[in-house]
Image (tube, grey):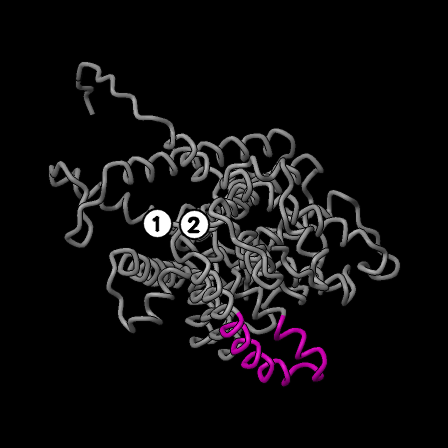
Amino acid sequence: MNKPKTRYQPLVRLLQPGKFFQKLSPANLILIGYVGTIMTGTLLLLLPSMVTPGNTLSFIDALFTSASAVCVTGLIVVDTATIYTFWGQLVILMLLQAGGLGYMTLTTILALAFRRRIEYRDRLAIKESLSQESPGGVVRFTIMIVKYTFIVEGIGALLLFFAFLRYFPPGKAIFAAIFHSVSAFCNAGFSIFSDSLEGFVLDPFVTLVMAGLIILGGLGFIVIAEIVRTRKIRTLHARVVVYITLSLIAAGFSIILLFEWNNQDTLGALPVGGRFLAALFHSVTPRTAGFNTISMDFFHPSTLFVTMFLMFVGASPGGTAGGVKTTVFAILLGFVNSSLRGKKTLEIYRRRIPQITANRAISLVMVASLYVLGIVVTVMVLQSFTPVEALFEVISAFGTVGLSTGITSELLSFNKFLIIITMYVGRVGFFSLLMLRWQRKPYDYLVYPEENLPV
């Protein structure tokens, strides 16, 4: 029996993958999907109506902006507020939303909207992109993600609208509220203000709403789903994510206060309440968000190193953020604790962690560190940046953060391309997907003799 045709039939055909895409593994489908989204955004940004009169946009700058938006990073080579028209900013907003939801989430929702069947191969790709344990129930979970995203962004936009209404006319306040709510929840760091949020450094309403959106986006959809369903934090994953998140925010807040309290170029010029507010925000924003209420150019090098550590750790799996993730950091802490105590097993919160998980976490940190080091050296060979400037920029790109000491616009074209690749690697979890492919190979049952090495 033939299926009845609908007016959406041409669109359904477009969503059907060709033979080439059908042969792709779920991991490769994710990698190629992000590339396609970035290139689409690049072509849109190159349209004449996207740039304000008197300005031009090169291909590499359009590619950089599109990659930064899709990878929810926030690094910019041209000023979003002055170079792009309303339509250009709208395209960036759409790219932010697509990048925050993720390629597989977006395509799943489109497929459901046009009544396309979600095949098992697609479910495997969704599982990997959302850090789920099994493909069962991933479609329902995807729908929940979209609902939760739009609800939180909607509430955030409403709150920011009333805040921005004190500074701007209603039309600009509405767009600014929507743009910054999406950018904050997606941990993107893009702003339509030339100085990011520096103009609101003493506004607790704007600062705290933005910080709340950043934290909610960085917790990860898996943890949020558990809290919404059970009203409790029960699983080991949720407990680790919440504990590490709060600990890193508290530690960053304390250290920034300590290092910058008397710095007249940063916290020292603010009233006491403003110092606490700015320190709190700058402890939250390195968790891959990228907004700033104080220029990063004037922070002490010690504060920048602390910020780099927070950026490298990043937020949590299954969310809108990058970095090596809080769960990996927790595994490393547990591994050190178990080693110092002479335990043969890795334990966290009275739960044993499989050895293969610990091995993967350690491998991820090692490979990521070597990758960042290699890019930093290359950038410094081509341009005379200080080690702190180059390291900060590369870690910001890898952690999909968007904070910068001000060197992004000065990068040579080749260095811009390296940063684009780094943002892409940080967003798609390239190393994690790579290790998943390696782990699919059959185990080698050949056991070699054991021999110890001094440590």
Location of residue 18 (image quadrant):
top right
Identify the residue position indicated by label 2 in the image.
127
- The amino acid type, in three-letter code, at marker 2 is Lys
Please tell me whether residue 452 is drawn above or below residue 1 in the rendered image. above
Is 336 positioned to the left or the right of 69 in the image? Answer: left
Q: Nearer the viewer, residue 30 or 83?
A: 30
- Report if residue 172 lies within the magenta region: yes
**Image spot of residue 200 (x, y percent):** 57, 74
Q: Nearer the viewer, residue 113 or 143?
A: 113
- The segment highlighted magenta reads 150-178
| SS class, disc 1 | loop
Furthest residue toward right? 54
C-beta proximity under 8 Å, tags 2 and 1: yes
**Image spot of residue 13 (x, y percent):** 68, 51
Identify the residue position indicated by label 1 in the image.
133
Q: Residues within 10 Å of mark 2 (few under 14, many from 20)?
A: many
Location of residue 451 (image quadrant):
top left
Q: Who's the residue at 70% across and 52% down the image?
A: 41
Furthest residue toward left? 342
Q: Who's the residue at 82% across and 54% down the image?
A: 47
Question: Looking at the figure, which quarter contains the C terminus?
Answer: top left
- Can residue 297 be seen here? The reply is no
**Image spot of residue 103 (x, y percent):** 56, 52
